């Protein structure tokens, strides 16, 4: 991987709808999911496009700003006189699910993940050179759940954790505690939120994680109102799916070969666009408050 490779995280502050168009089951507007795992995902094209929009990277803006033009690319129609089109140098992978918030009988909600989810994300940590001191927790037994410390966990009562309609036997696990500390330090700035995350992170069995990814999203019924009668229009009922608030996803970003400029370096582009935390609106339903997210960039 390039030396400038960084981890980035997406933290959903409100429900997040990255849709795929019309669904084939009872959910009319589902969220995008990975083909193999069925887990929710945010495409890298969405992430890059929204960040470009945040920095004002319209075709007109790119004509005037060489940094924007180099980072996000420009088409033939938007080129300055005599210039050539170029691809964007910044590369964003898909943001894959790291932790899904799930309702808990104790502690209100848990951030759950799985052995397989962390095993896949561990490869991203390795690519970014940030895997030191981490080991992937084992896949727990079907009736077990791994937490960092039983005594400080917000989820555990009398050795039991209840998530939705499922109950698990809590097991303290050192590797889970290390992941909780690592992720908390990267994603949250405030000390109290770091502690809340460490108290609520749990590793569930892979099969249970699949189940929660399928059933743990928000599904909201929507209707359309007749203008004249102010009643529900016949046949105008549909269901929308969203990732719940507090969902955490992560991916990689790096700078590819710099196109169209001799003065701008890969390091400068990463420092300019992939350094500070950004608050964005991502996905659909922006006018009703959906899709508010934090994008957090890790260190190289």
Image (cartoon, rainbow, N blue to C red):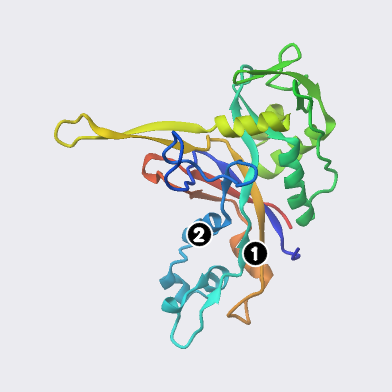
Residue reaching furthest front?
24
The residue located at (56%, 30%) in the rendering is 215
In the current view of this chain or complex, which residue is farthest to the left?
228
* Residue 71 located left or right of residue 201: left
Whether 245 is drawn above or below 44: the answer is above
Disc 2 is placed on an element classified as helix
* Lower sequence index among marks 1 and 2: 2
Query: In the image shown, does 87 or 30 lie closer to the viewer?
Result: 30
- For the point 50% across and 42% down, which residue is it? 31
Label 2, on which residue?
49
Task: Tell me the element at label 1.
Answer: helix
- Image coordinates of residue 73 in percent, x first then y, are 53, 71
Q: Is residue 151 left or right of residue 93?
A: right
Select label 1 or label 2 by which is in front: 2
User: Residue 126 location, x and y as percent?
Assistant: 79, 53
Numbered badge on residue 141: none
Q: How far across and down, in percent of the image, does residue 296 sit?
A: 62, 49
What residue is disc 1 on?
270
- Which image quarter is the N terminus in? bottom right
Q: Is residue 283 left or right of residue 226?
A: right
Estimate the spatial distance between the alpha carbons at disc 1 and disc 2, rounded to whole Å.
16 Å
Examine the image and state in which quarter residue 11 appears.
top right
Q: Residue 229: name its quadrant.
A: top left
Rendered-image quadrant of the C terminus? bottom right
């Amino acid at each position: 991987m390039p030396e400038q490779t960084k981890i980035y995280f997406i933290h959903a502050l409100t429900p997040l709808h990255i849709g795929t168009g019309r669904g084939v089951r009872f959910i009319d507007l589902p969220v995008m999911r990975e083909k193999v795992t069925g887990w929710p995902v945010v495409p890298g094209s969405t992430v890059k496009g929204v960040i470009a929009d945040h920095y004002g990277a319209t075709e007109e803006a790119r004509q005037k700003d060489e940094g924007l033009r180099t980072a996000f690319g420009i088409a033939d129609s938007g080129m300055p006189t005599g210039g050539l089109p170029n691809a964007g140098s910044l590369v964003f992978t898909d943001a894959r699910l790291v932790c899904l918030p799930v309702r808990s009988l104790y502690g209100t909600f848990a951030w759950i993940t799985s052995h397989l989810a962390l095993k896949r994300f561990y490869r991203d940590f390795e690519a970014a050179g940030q895997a030191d001191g981490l080991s992937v927790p084992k896949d727990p037994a079907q009736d077990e759940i791994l937490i960092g410390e039983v005594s400080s966990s917000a989820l555990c009562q009398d050795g039991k954790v209840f998530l939705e309609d499922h109950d698990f036997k809590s097991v303290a696990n050192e590797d889970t505690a290390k992941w909780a500390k690592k992720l908390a330090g990267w994603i949250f700035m405030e000390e109290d939120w770091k502690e809340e995350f460490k108290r609520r992170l749990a590793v569930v069995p892979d099969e249970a994680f699949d189940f929660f990814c399928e059933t743990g999203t928000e599904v909201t019924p929507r209707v359309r109102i007749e203008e004249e009668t102010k009643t529900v229009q016949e046949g105008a009922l549909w269901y929308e799916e969203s990732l719940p608030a507090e969902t955490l996803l992560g991916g990689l970003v790096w700078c590819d070969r710099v196109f169209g400029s001799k003065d701008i370096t890969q390091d400068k582009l990463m420092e300019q666009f992939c350094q500070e935390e950004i608050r964005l609106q991502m996905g659909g339903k922006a006018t009703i408050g959906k899709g508010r997210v934090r994008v957090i960039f890790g260190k190289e």
